[in-house]
Image (cartoon, helix red, strand yellow):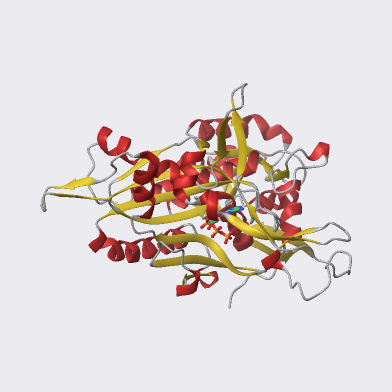
Amino acid sequence: MAVNSQATLEKLVSLCKRRGFVYQSAEIYGGLNGVYDFGPLGTLLKQNIRKAWTNSLLNLDLDILFMEGAILAPEKVWQASGHLENFHDPMVDCMVCKHRYRADDIDLQKPCPHCGNKQWTEVRDFNLMFKTQLGAASTSVAYLRPETAQSIFINFKNIISSNRVKIPFGIAQIGKAFRNEITPKQFLFRMREFEQMEIEWFCKEEEAMKFFDMWCKERINFYKKIGLNTENIHLRAHEKTELSHYSSATSDVEYQFPFGWKELEGIAYRGNFDLSQHMKFSGKDLSVYDEQTKTSYVPHVVECSVGVDRLFLTLLFDSYHEDTVEGETRIVLKFDPKIAPIKAAFMPLSKELNPKMEAIYKEIKKLGYEVTFDDSGSIGKRYRRQDEIGTPVCLTYDFDSEKDNSVTVRDRDTMKQERIKIDSINSYLKKIIEK
Ligand code: ATP
């Protein structure tokens, strides 16, 4: 049972702000609840998460096409998908202090956790979609998408007719989604504006369960490859009562957060519900022709859906470590080097060595690595700064460097040091990132 007990939400929120990973959105105006901005390091970390996800799909040797759909979609789309009717959470208010809760989050037999009174309103359904109107006349209603999946389904015909793909194949997308969560909480775990990475895998009905099993296996592999502690991830099959009416199999990849095992990614066999619904509501034929049987059919779908931000938070929890070095607490983010926002820090031992080290740093930066130059404070302080943001290696240029054409490399996790030749820095970094 390996939950990482050293990381708490408070410590992570504070680290994220202190080091420029994540800020509360519009903080100088009091903040916007459930909405966050990403600073320089957070932006790099997100880019690495997207890159790792995309590469994990490209490496599978399957037909997968990528697309970027619009965030706005007309009402009809959400009627067809069922979101207008069903995408809601139960909401309840305390009549005394007006605090609002998700009714399934609290025990209504007990008093309000905020003010201690027990006077609840009726439980009402609250639709989680953000509604808006297009144009000056405001006659056309649109919604911000609550998931990226529907833009894949409504483009299914466009994609198959403009690309030479055959069933089975997948369409993948990374993009923003919006949900007016009643109580956003746990930092990046439940946000109102977030980003999803989704793949819709189109196949024949008789092959769907085989592909469902394949995707469950591949998605767990992905989390292992990006370095998550395997004891903190598992696959949980939904009980029959939990399944959506259109799904005959759904499994969640769950992560063991300090606040419990929670969904990180959903893998769902959705039948052909989505395409059939869009056929019905749009009047357009979304079936494909099977050369073998000479008949048309509506493909079945297996969906894998994970939040970029929820994975970001998971990686922070998973990589956070504290130990004691020279009597002081050292905070380390033990990110896999592929995921680490900064790959290496270049440090001249003394200011007079700056020009030499800066020249090496610039050469390496030109090769496309995310690297940083740090010449302020003691070497010990500089190491601590890099440990805290998860930089896998620090390179130091000292007074011997000129003579032996070498620098000292210090490993973030073991803190061991070794001497390497300056002209081998590129291959050294390449090796640790590709490991
Ligand atoms: P939950 O039960 O946690 O609300 P869900 O079942 O509604 O999740 P899905 O609709 O399956 O979530 O969305 C797929 C993925 O998108 C989730 O596994 C999660 O990683 C991410 N996600 C969903 N809602 C949010 C949110 N409000 N904030 C951040 N990420 C989210």
Residue most toward the bottom?
A: 1
Foreground of the two, 332 or 82: 82
Q: Residue 400: where, in percent of width, then height? A: 61, 43
Task: Indicate the quadrant where residue 108 lies.
Answer: bottom right
Foreground of the two, 292 or 198: 292
State left or right for residue 310 relative to residue 429: right
State left or right for residue 211 relative to residue 393: left
Task: Indicate the quadrant where residue 415 lies.
Answer: bottom right
Foreground of the two, 423 or 403: 423
Residue most toward the top?
A: 136
Total residue callouts:
0
Quadrant for the C terminus in the image? bottom left
Q: Which residue is drawn at 70% across and 65% down?
A: 103
Q: Is residue 416 visible?
A: no
- Ligand 1 lies in quarter: bottom right
Quadrant for the N terminus in the image? bottom right
Figure check: 282 above or below 309: above
Q: Which residue is drawn at 53% across and 67% down?
A: 254
State left or right for residue 315 relative to residue 239: right
Task: Indicate the quadrant where residue 189 lies.
Answer: bottom right
Figure check: 200 above or below 31: below
Foreground of the two, 150 or 10: 150
Figure check: 134 above or below 195: above
Q: Residue 379: where, in percent of width, then height? A: 72, 48
State left or right for residue 224 relative to residue 188: left
Q: Residue 411: where, in percent of width, then height? A: 58, 55
Q: Residue at x 12, y 48 (%)?
A: 291
Figure check: 310 above or below 38: below
Q: Can residue 386 be seen in this view?
A: yes
